[in-house]
Image: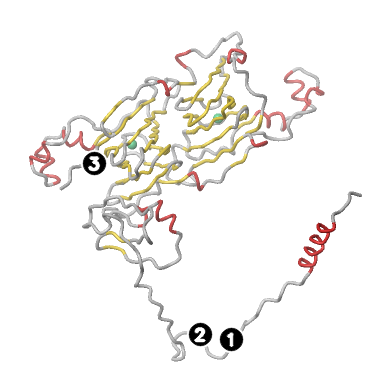
Amino acid sequence: MAPVHLSGLLVLLAHQLVTALPAPNPTINQHPTETSYLGYNPTNVLDTADTHSIQFSYAPGQTNSPNDGASLNFIGLDNPQPIRGSKGGYDPGPRTEQYDVLNPDALAPPTTDHGSVDNAQWPLGLSHVKLGLGRAGWSRQQNEDQIPAATEMAGVDMRLEPGGYRELHWHKAAEWSLVLNGTVRVQAVNEEGQTFVDDLEAGDVWFFPPGVPHSLQALDQGVEFLLVFDDGSFSEDNTFLASEIFAYNPISVLAKDLQVPESAFKNIPAGQLFIFPGTPAPSNISEQNVTGSAGIVPFDSSYSYHFSKAPNTYTTPGGTVKIVDPTVFPIASGFSAALVTIKPGAMREIHWHTTSDEWNYFLAGSARIGIYAAEANSQTFDYHAGSTGYIQKGMTHYIENIGDDDVVFLEVLQADHFSDISLGQWLALTPSQIVMDTVNLTAETVSQFKKEKQYIVMGGPEP
Ligand code: MN
Ligand code: MN
C-alpha cells in the first residue's frame, strides 16, 4: 500500500464528515391560513418601489427625431435603455446588459423598423461546439435549427490543430469553404476515379460536389475554415464517414470486398472519428499525389480556387468587394460569393438579389443589417466577428459598419454568378419623373442619384 500523508488523510476524513451530515430539512409553509392572498383585501399593502427614477445615459443619437435611426453605440455607456426619440421606456427589470451592448438595434430599434422579419442573425458563439478527439480540433454550426428561414444554406466553422484530420467523408449537400486562418491539405476522388490534392491558405476556397468523398488535414500551423452547404437542414452530425463504413459492415464482407484476410481488420475504429489527430502530412505535396488510369481532376474542374491571390473586383473609397463565382471557379456551380470589406462609417449600399437567398458570415468588425421584407415589414439586426446571417431573396438590405474597425464579411448566394440590384442605380436609371412622382422627391435630388452601382458608400452628407 502506498504511504498516505497525515494531512491528506485529515482532509479526506473532514471531507467525508461534511458529506456524511444529513441535509437540513426545507422549511415548509404549505397552507398559510391567517389571511387569504386571493384578490382584494384591505390588509394587502402595496410595496411602492420606484421603478421610474433610473440612472442612465443616452447614446449619441438616441434622442434624435423619429425615423433618423442612426446606429447607437452603448459600449461603456451607463445602463443603456430601450428608448428611441419619443418612443420606448425604461428597463428596470431582469436583464443582462452584455446582450444590449452587442445588439443595440434590438434594444432600441430604428423607429422605421415595422412589423416583423424572420430572424436573420445567429452568433456562432452561441452554437454548441463539437469537440474533436485527442485535442485535434472542434466544430460548430448554424442551420435551420438556429435560423429557421435559412432553408437554402447552412454553415460550419471548423478548427483542426496541426496534423489534425477531418476524416474521409462525404455528404448529400455541396460544400463550399473559405479558409479563415492557417494552412490545410485537401484531397478527393471523384466518380471517374480522378484524384485531387491541394494545399490552401487563409483566403482560399474549395468546393466538393455532393457525394464526392474528401478529407482535410491541417498542415503544421493548424487551420480554421468556414464551410457553407447548399441545404439549410445540413448537419455536420449527418455525414457519411469512412470509419463508420468499417465499423458498421461485417468483417467478412469487408474482407471479401477488399480481397484481404479478415485479420487485417483487427484494429479498425469501433465508431466514427470525425476530427482526430494524425500523422503529420508530408510537406512535399507530390508524395500524396496518388493517380490511377483516369489521372488527376482537370484544372477546369478543379476543387480549389486560390482566392487569396486574386485581386479585388471593386475598389471604392468605402471599401472593397472581391467576388468568386462559377465564372472563375466553374466546379462550384451554384456558389457565388463576395468577400466585402467596409471601412468604419461606410455601408454596403441598399440592394437585393433577384433569385437567391444570401448567407452571411462576419470575419471582423461590427455591423448592422437592415432588412425590408415587403408589405410593411422591416427589421434591423446586429452582427460581430463570428456571426452568421441570412437574408431571403428579394428582400432589400444594407450592411453598415457600426464599429471603429473594418468590417469584413461574406455574402454567399446560390446563383451561377454574383449579382444584385442596387437601389441607387435602379432609381437613377428610371425616368426621373416616375421617381419624383412616386417618392415625392425634387428633380435636383433625383439628378444626384448615381447611374453606376456604388457597392460601398461613405457616410452621407449632413443635412
Ligand atoms: Mn465535407
Ligand atoms: Mn447582398
Label 3 residue SS:
loop
Crowding at mark 2 (Cα within 10 Å: few <14, some 14-19, many 20+): few
The residue depicted at 63 percent of the width and 34 percent of the height is 136
The residue depicted at 65 percent of the width and 80 percent of the height is 28
Q: CA distance from mark 3 to mark 2?
A: 59 Å
Is 293 left or right of 122, judged from the image as shown? right
> How far from the left and from the top, in percent, is residue 451?
17, 31
Ligand 1 sits in which quadrant?
Answer: top right
Relative vertical location of residue 291 with respect to residue 2 in this rendering, above or below: above
Relative vertical location of residue 326 with respect to residue 109 in this rendering, above or below: above
Crowding at mark 1 (Cα within 10 Å: few <14, some 14-19, many 20+): few
Disc 3: which residue: 459
| Mark closest to the chain's N terminus, 3 or 2 | 2
Do tag 3 and tag 2 residues touch (Cβ < 8 Å)?
Answer: no
Do tag 2 and tag 1 residues touch (Cβ < 8 Å)?
Answer: yes
| Mark closest to the chain's N terminus, 2 or 1 | 1
Disc 1: which residue: 32
Relative vertical location of residue 248 with respect to residue 365 in this rendering, above or below: above
Is 377 left or right of 18, judged from the image as shown? left
Circle number at residue 259 = none
> How far from the left and from the top, in percent, is residue 446?
12, 39
Crowding at mark 3 (Cα within 10 Å: few <14, some 14-19, many 20+): few
Q: How many marks?
A: 3
Q: CA distance from mark 2 to mark 1?
A: 9 Å
Amino acid under disc 3: Gly
Q: Would residue 216 be seen by someone viewing this image from the given angle?
A: no
Q: CA distance from mark 1 to mark 3?
A: 65 Å
Amino acid under disc 1: Pro
Q: Would residue 259 be seen by someone viewing this image from the given angle?
A: yes
> How far from the left and from the top, in percent, is residue 421?
26, 34
Circle number at residue 37 = 2
